[in-house]
Image (cartoon, rainbow, N blue to C red):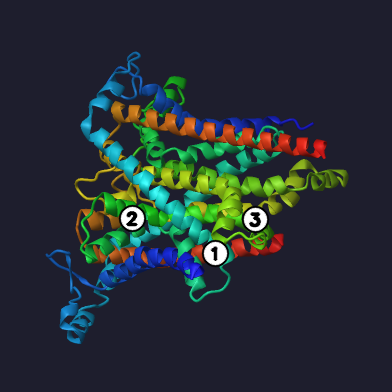
């Protein structure tokens, strides 16, 4: 009996507040927009019994999905989200790898402090960390002031409200997610492997490429998924740092819902986004599973 | 023995500068006397004063703290239960669905979680307000709590609890006096994580809040969307300060607890 309560309380909570809401999204995505409260039709009328359910089922169709497929805007938004997420994941990797490498090579007594310094920003507000870049990247911002002062440029760069600002924002906010798994992989590495390679006449550079880099592959893969998956559905960063021409699907969904008040189309956008994300999510789970099995 | 090469030292320095410089600039310019955020016009704390007199911000801060506290407590209880189910309960019908529902919210884009919860609240005719934000936050943070707690439970030696049961403890007593103290650090960090996630959330709260229940992130977002404002800098500085203080205190006390435990262990060995 006790076991039953223990299982059923969190189970029911998740069914009511996670599974059922998602089924509702699926259902609304098959409905039509209407000038009513709630702003879609048909709504299920259970008081009419079976007849009501049949009428309701009859009113559902794939129309919103055809609309998405027809309208260029949505295709472009999905593709450009994929592109932005992929490019920023790669840039995050470029920044994170040398840092994680430096951490793993630092003296043992320094490593906990460095670890804490990497995790600390994660505890501060995401919104504030994104906001901080507005003052840096704007036309009269600190970056331009600095570059003009050094004489590297003569006219201020326009970075804020472009895709470049979005890349910077994603790299900045997701950097810890990439550093931590790579550091975990590098830290486990046996240093005597490198000594052996050097004894056998390997240069330090080729020892890195032949030993260190392949051994950190699992960390790189895990980190890339941890950055790519949330970046794909990101809303705050494109909304604050991107411009009107920055197309990301999270932003499209938000505007479809809050500005256009077209709930059925917003729901269809959500369903497709999830279908796209399921592939990397499953790949990520498999990769984690493989790691766990490899570790014993 | 280990000395950092110049390459490693440079990448660490640049990396830390990249992580912290934006926040340092934000904090410094919250004490700027001028209205322009990018031009220094002398030291002043006037933005802090005007922030505390801004009733809309103070109300939003109060709503945020209330939602954060209640939802993180609920999430800790539900998440700990879910962790025990995943690690201990063995097979039961629908286990795959259960663990799927625990992990899925972790990777679900916030816009989708927010939209789906809003549609649920509309469908059951629930008015949006503080309660709906609490329900929404509890749901996604309980999954984070359960991941944190279950990683600790996996490492826990089950025979300790069995010993307590053999010695005549009821299952509940055994849980309370053996298991709970051992997993307590994970439960506490789970609570902290749930609390920060709730304080930080903009997207899900925007979908599930009503007109009378604006949270701080929603307020900040609408102010910041138009540009930078020195008042927001002051607010951010306070929030960064609280987090830094909290994290440093927790890590120092836990470090002290570990050294104390070690010393007691050594003493016990010496006495034996």
Q: Earlier in the sequence, mark 3 or mark 2?
A: 2
Quadrant in which the C terminus of chain B appears: top right
Between label 1 and label 3, give the one nearer the viewer: 3
Between label 3 and label 2, give the one nearer the viewer: 3
Up the image or down, B70 lies above or below B161; here it is above
Secondary structure beneath dot 3 equals loop
Label 1 marks a residue whose chain is B
**Label 3: how many Cα within 10 Å (few below 14, some 14–19, many 20+):** some
Secondary structure beneath dot 1 equals helix
- Identified at 37% across, 42% down, the residue is B199
Pinpoint residue B50: horizontal percent, then vertical percent: 25, 23
- Identified at 34% across, 27% down, the residue is B234
Up the image or down, B147 lies above or below A4; here it is above
- Using the rendered image, report if marks 1 and 2 lie on a common chain: yes
- Identified at 71% across, 31% down, the residue is B4
Label 3 marks a residue whose chain is B
The one nearer the camera, A124 or B249, is: B249
The one nearer the camera, B261 or A262, is: B261
Asked if the residues shown at circle 1 and circle 3 are in contact, with their CB atoms under 8 angstroms apart, the answer is no
| Residue on which the image places disc 3 | B156
| Residue on which the image places disc 2 | B135
**On the picture, is A199 further left or further right than B129?**
right
- Using the rendered image, report if marks 3 and 2 lie on a common chain: yes
| Residue on which the image places disc 1 | B86
On residue B67, the disc is none
Q: CA distance from mark 3 to mark 2?
A: 31 Å
Asked if the residues shown at circle 1 and circle 2 are in contact, with their CB atoms under 8 angstroms apart, the answer is no
**On the picture, is A270 further left or further right than A35?**
right
- Identified at 33% across, 55% down, the residue is B135
Q: Quadrant of residue B224?
A: top left
């Amino acid at each position: 009996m006790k076991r039953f309560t223990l299982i059923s309380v969190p189970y029911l909570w998740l069914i009511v507040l996670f599974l059922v809401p998602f089924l509702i999204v699926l259902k609304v995505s098959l409905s039509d927009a209407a000038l009513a409260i709630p702003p879609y039709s048909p709504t299920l009328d259970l008081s009419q019994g079976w007849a009501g359910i049949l009428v309701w089922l009859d009113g559902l169709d794939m129309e919103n999905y055809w609309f998405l497929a027809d309208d260029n805007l949505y295709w472009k938004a999905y593709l450009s989200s994929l592109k932005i997420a992929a490019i920023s994941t790669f840039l995050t990797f470029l920044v994170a790898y040398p840092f994680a490498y430096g951490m793993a090579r630092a003296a043992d007594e320094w490593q906990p402090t460095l670890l804490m310094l990497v995790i600390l920003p994660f505890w501060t507000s995401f919104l504030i960390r994104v906001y901080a870049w507005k003052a840096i990247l704007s036309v009269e911002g600190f970056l331009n002031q600095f570059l003009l002062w050094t004489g590297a440029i003569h006219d201020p760069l326009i970075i804020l409200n472009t895709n470049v600002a979005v890349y910077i924002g994603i790299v900045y906010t997701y950097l810890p997610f990439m550093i931590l798994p790579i550091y975990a992989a590098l830290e486990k590495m046996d240093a005597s492997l490198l000594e052996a390679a050097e004894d056998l006449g390997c240069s330090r550079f080729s020892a890195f490429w032949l030993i260190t880099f392949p051994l950190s592959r699992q960390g790189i893969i895990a980190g890339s998924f941890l950055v790519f998956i949330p970046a794909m559905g990101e809303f705050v960063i494109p909304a604050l740092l991107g411009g009107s021409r920055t197309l990301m699907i999270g932003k499209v969904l938000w505007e479809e819902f809050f500005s256009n008040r077209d709930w059925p189309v917003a729901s269809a956008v959500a369903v497709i986004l999830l279908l796209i994300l399921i592939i990397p999510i499953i790949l990520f789970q498999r990769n984690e599973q493989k790691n766990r099995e490899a570790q014993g | 023995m280990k000395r950092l090469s110049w390459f490693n030292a440079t990448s660490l320095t640049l990396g830390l500068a990249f992580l912290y410089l934006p926040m340092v600039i934000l904090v410094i310019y919250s004490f700027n006397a001028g209205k322009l955020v990018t031009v220094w016009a002398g030291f002043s704390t006037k933005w802090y004063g005007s922030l505390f007199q801004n009733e809309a911000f103070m109300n939003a801060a109060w709503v945020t703290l209330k939602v954060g506290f209640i939802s993180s407590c609920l999430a800790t209880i539900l998440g700990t239960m879910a962790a025990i189910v995943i690690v201990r309960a063995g097979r039961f019908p629908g286990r795959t669905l259960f663990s799927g529902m625990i992990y899925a919210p972790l990777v679900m884009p916030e816009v989708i979680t927010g939209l789906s919860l809003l549609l649920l609240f509309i469908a059951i005719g629930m008015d949006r307000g503080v309660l709906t934000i609490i329900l929404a936050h509890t749901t996604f943070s309980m999954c984070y709590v359960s991941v944190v707690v279950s990683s600790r439970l996996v490492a826990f030696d089950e025979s300790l609890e069995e010993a307590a049961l053999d010695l005549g403890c009821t299952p509940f007593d055994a849980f309370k006096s053996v298991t709970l103290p051992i997993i307590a650090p994970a439960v506490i960090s789970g609570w902290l994580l749930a609390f920060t996630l709730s304080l930080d959330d903009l997207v899900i709260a925007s979908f599930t809040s009503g007109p009378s229940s604006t949270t701080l992130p929603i307020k900040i977002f609408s102010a910041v969307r138009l540009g930078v404002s020195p008042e927001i800098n002051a607010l951010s500085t306070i929030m960064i300060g609280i987090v830094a203080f909290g994290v440093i205190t927790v890590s120092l006390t836990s470090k002290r607890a570990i050294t104390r435990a070690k010393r007691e262990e050594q003493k016990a060995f010496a006495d034996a």
